Image (cartoon, rainbow, N blue to C red):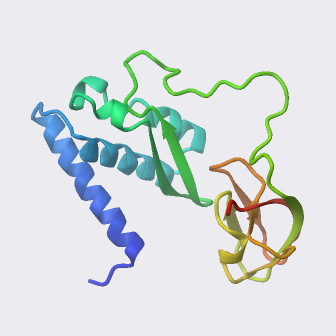
Amino acid sequence: MHLTPREHERLLLAAAADLARRRLARGARLGVTEAVALVCDEVCEMAWDGMAHDEVVARARHLVDPSSILDGAAAAVPSVQVEALFPHGTALVHVDAPFGSPGDDDAGAVRVGDGEVVLAPGRERAEATLHNTGRLDVWVSSHVPLDALNPALVVTTPPGRWRLDVPAGTALRVAPDEHRRVEIVELSP
């Protein structure tokens, strides 16, 4: 069987998650690798089933009880990130404190004060035009460099390397034959 690198990684993740499930079933505690694999596998499956991104993140924080992992594992994994395939396309899912304390619903929460929050402060910003020349919708994820997109998407930007100026984990849809003006931000050097 011939697998793409992405398919190979997904199968390895599923195998490690199955190992974690077997260990939990017999009452054994999980190490970092198995615990992370279990969270990532479940995130990928929830995304595949069409669950909303925010709900996936909220559920992922409660998948593994802290008492089910080896001492020190929670401190070793302050967050987990995995690219998951949602019905609209691939998106980065970031889960803070995936093994937080039981009953601590705000574990790893980021609290922002009043006022405007500037993403990527100090970086140059500009506008770009995205034109979908294909027959299907194209989704552009927040973290993808604009020079590495689907070739059906013609991108007009100033010189340099850019990405969308949107929050991490979000994506923008460009319909067939749509011309879309977007805000962009310079990629970090």
Q: Nearer the viewer, residue 143 or 64?
A: 143
Q: Name the foreground residue: 116 vs 2.
A: 116
Residue 52 visible? The answer is no
Farthest residue, direction top: 103
Give residue 151's position: percent from left, percent from top.
69, 83
Q: Residue at x 22, y 40 (%)?
A: 31
Figure quadrant of the N terminus: bottom left
Q: Quadrant of residue 162?
A: bottom right
Q: Splitting the image into 4 quarters, where does residue 155 fall? A: bottom right
Q: What x and y, as percent, mark residue 110?
A: 61, 28
Q: Is residue 162 visible?
A: yes
118, above or below 58, in the image:
below
Estimate the x, y position of residue 156 in percent, counting from the top left.
85, 77
The structure residue drawn at horizontal position 27% and vertical position 42%, both measured from the top left corner, is 32
The residue at the point 58 percent across, 56 percent down is 91
| Up/down of 24 relative to 41, above or below | above
Q: Is residue 65 above or below residue 94?
A: above
**142 lies left or right of 21:** right
